[in-house]
Image (cartoon, helix red, strand yellow):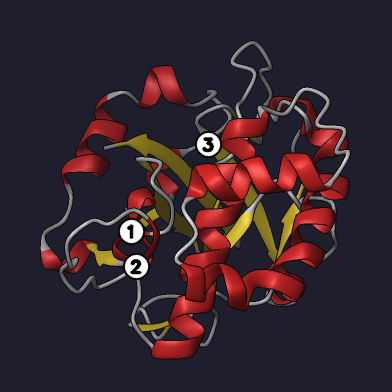
Amino acid sequence: MQITPYPKFETVFENDTLKGIFYPLCKISNFGLAGEKSLFFVSHNGIWTDENVKNDYNRSNFICFDLKNGKYSFKGDLTVYLGHRHAREVFNTLETDFKKHGNDYLSQRLKTDDYSANIVEKYEIQFGDLDPEYYLQAFYEFAINKLSFEKTGNFGAFNEIINDWGKTDKSPIVYEVKDGNTSGFEDIMANRDYLFPESLKIDAYEKIGYIVGHEFFTDGNDTYLLFDDMGNTILCVDHYS
């Protein structure tokens, strides 16, 4: 399996509908299925979900994408994601600020709480139904981790940079099924009737692997990736570790 961390948003999604809601974590290719196709691990960490919204394509615990021209096509319901109306605007403000000041934040080893306080003081941001603390935490930890990786090639070092944690062990980034990492998938399959609508035929999907959420953020919301090669459909399942 070939793993490319932090692909650009526009190379993952066919449009910007999910900008500010989903983070592209990594691209995988040469994984033994789907010929030359590439897949992506993505996460909506930083956004709470509405468990009362039920539809066939995305709920609080999963999302399906169609793979079209190598990109993810969204066909679900945005109201699953609380604060979705404000997410793109808030994200754009934070992204613009980080492009200007990210290197300073990294060199200063600025802690998450100090970053959040600085942003709230600097900008008049309308968060709407977003949880400001959670959203700012997820954005900053993702952004500082990405910047650190781009500069050093070291993945997942943000905790030792900004949270004074000890040196972290090297991560495979994607934990592959072939390496025997199946316990989370076993939980998902055992709870399939609760997690998925009847229309989602889970047996059609091949188990690809998973990422650990706290290696990209401090959130423990992991992402499990499955793929239906015949239907060209991706299934991302949230699973808290």
Amino acid type of the residue that numbered disc 1 sits on in the rendered structure? Asn
Mark 3–mark 1 Cα distance, whole angstroms, equals 27 Å
Q: Please tell me which residue is depicted at 60% across the width and 32% down the height of the picture.
A: 133
- Judging by the rendered image, the residue that carries numbered circle 3 is 62
Q: Name the element at disc 3.
A: strand
Q: In the rendering, which numbered label is found on residue 159?
A: 1
**Disc nearest the viewer among 2 and 3:** 2
Q: Are the residues at dot 3 and dot 1 in contact (C-beta closer than 8 Å)? A: no
- Relative depth, front residue between 233 and 20: 20
Q: Name the element at disc 1.
A: helix
Which residue is outermost to the top?
Answer: 52
- Relative depth, front residue between 11 and 225: 11
Q: Earlier in the sequence, mark 3 or mark 1?
A: 3
**Disc nearest the viewer among 3 and 1:** 1
Mark 2–mark 3 Cα distance, whole angstroms, equals 24 Å
Q: Earlier in the sequence, mark 2 or mark 3?
A: 3
Q: Are the residues at dot 1 and dot 2 in contact (C-beta closer than 8 Å)? A: yes
Q: In the rendering, which numbered label is found on residue 138?
A: none
- Relative depth, front residue between 234 and 151: 151
Residue 82 sits above or below residue 31 on the image: above
Amino acid type of the residue that numbered disc 3 sits on in the rendered structure? Phe
Residue 28 sits above or below residue 116 on the image: below
Q: Name the element at disc 2.
A: loop
Regarding residue 81, the answer to whether it shows in the image is yes
The quarter of the picture where residue 56 lies is top right
> Residue 49: image x %, image y %?
62, 25
Q: Please tell me which residue is depicted at 76% across the width and 41% down the height of the picture.
A: 121
Residue 226 sits above or below residue 80 on the image: below
The quarter of the picture where residue 48 lies is top right
